[in-house]
Image (cartoon, grey):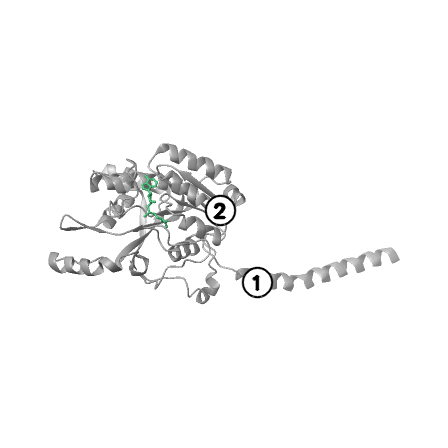
Amino acid sequence: MARRSNTKLKDIRTTNLKIAAEPIKKAELKVAEKPAVKCKKYNDIDLNKWKEYEHIKTDTLWLFPSRDNTGRHSNEYHGNYIPQLARQFFERYTKQRDIVIDLFLGSGTSAIEALNMGRRCIGVELKQELAEHVRNKFTQKELVTEVNIIAGDSASKDTVEKIKARLEIMGEEKAQFLVLHPPYDNIIKFSDKKEDLSNCATTEEFYDMFEQVAKNGYEMLEDERFAALIIGDEYKDGECKLLSFECVQRMQKLGFKLKAAIVKDIQGNERAKGKTAHLWRYRALNGGFYIFQHEYIFIFQKIESKKLKKSNKNDKIQM
Ligand SMILES: C[S@@+](CC[C@H](N)C(=O)[O-])C[C@H]1O[C@@H](n2cnc3c(N)ncnc32)[C@H](O)[C@@H]1O
């Protein structure tokens, strides 16, 4: 008898415990409903603290009074872009450890800033000696795990294969952000190489080569991820040529969705323009044109490959 009543007592205690445990569970559920950190899939910006990101630009006019030349950055290369752009792109569109591909690496601005921000980078530059020079900006360890610099033609299949191999070594199938900062036709001639986009016989050829590079970039970018195109226009043969708009259209044709068209002031980024400024002003007054004070930054998002195939199919049916 005594044993039986002990068992009953145990049962009652267990039941009481269960009842007591219930309100705690409910309270725990309430905490889980409001996540501590709210981020998009493609960045680490905590939207719960969105007011703390005042340094991130969300409007379409970008003015930077001067170039940031701190750390490994410098103004050594004519035609480089300012690191502040890379900083804006990477914070807005990448997460820690993501891989950025830059298919016109130049002096390595994207690679330096990617590392500064805990991202990784694969960069391609056509000029062998420049690629070597940029490699020297990094330690041997960084060159193994964080940054890969390829000397080659970004329009070629061979370069695509090399990038894919590097991605595999870095444990990724595709990259998470794409930077395209091509020559602006032949405004600055970078080399005599036939593969150089600044060395094309015609502007039409420049567009075709640019499209091939953008196509390669599209192939190596993860679905739904972002790309930035930095480009200016040119005044040639008495006419203003909108290189930017044509390049945007070529990218849209490939399956990049245009998310933003940003105007960036270029005054702080020009080198040695001072002496010729008066001459240009005279030429402008005489020729009826205006001197460029801006370039563009276009932000794109890669349309998911499956959706793109479907819409291409529908286009063909409609035709
Ligand atoms: C406007 S600059 C890029 C500058 C770079 N964003 C920086 O901050 O230093 C364009 C670069 O593209 C390179 N280039 C031209 N044609 C190329 C090609 N087919 N493949 C790879 N790089 C190319 C040029 O040598 C030049 O360094």
Residue 200 sits in quarter: top left
Quarter of the image containing the C terminus? top left
Residue 31 is labelled as: 1
Q: Is residue 194 left or right of residue 165?
A: left
Q: Quadrant of the N terminus?
A: bottom right
Residue type of the residue flagged with mark 1: Val
Cβ of disc 1 within 8 Å of ligand 1? no
Foreground pick, 81 / 256: 81
- Depth order, front residue of 142/188: 188
User: Which residue extends farthest right?
Assistant: 2
Whichever of labels 2 and 1 marks the residue nearer the N terminus, that label is 1
Residue placed furthest toward the top: 158
Assign a secondary structure to mark 1: helix
Look at 50% across and 49% down and name the residue there: 97
> Which structural element holds mark 2?
loop
Q: Which mark is residue 138?
A: 2
Q: Position of residue 236 (x, y in %)?
A: 17, 48
Q: Quadrant of ligand 1?
A: top left
Residue beneath the point at 45% across and 50% down? 112
* Residue 101 visible within the image: yes
Using the image, determine if residue 219 lies above or below residue 288.
above
At 56% from the left and 60% from the top, the residue drawn is 32
The residue at the point 22 percent across, 57 percent down is 276
Out of 165 and 104, give the one closest to the viewer.
Answer: 104
Residue 136 location in percent, x, y?
A: 46, 45
Q: CA distance from mark 2 to mark 1?
A: 45 Å
Task: Please provide percent x and percent y for residue 28.
Answer: 60, 61
- Disc 2 marks which amino acid? Phe
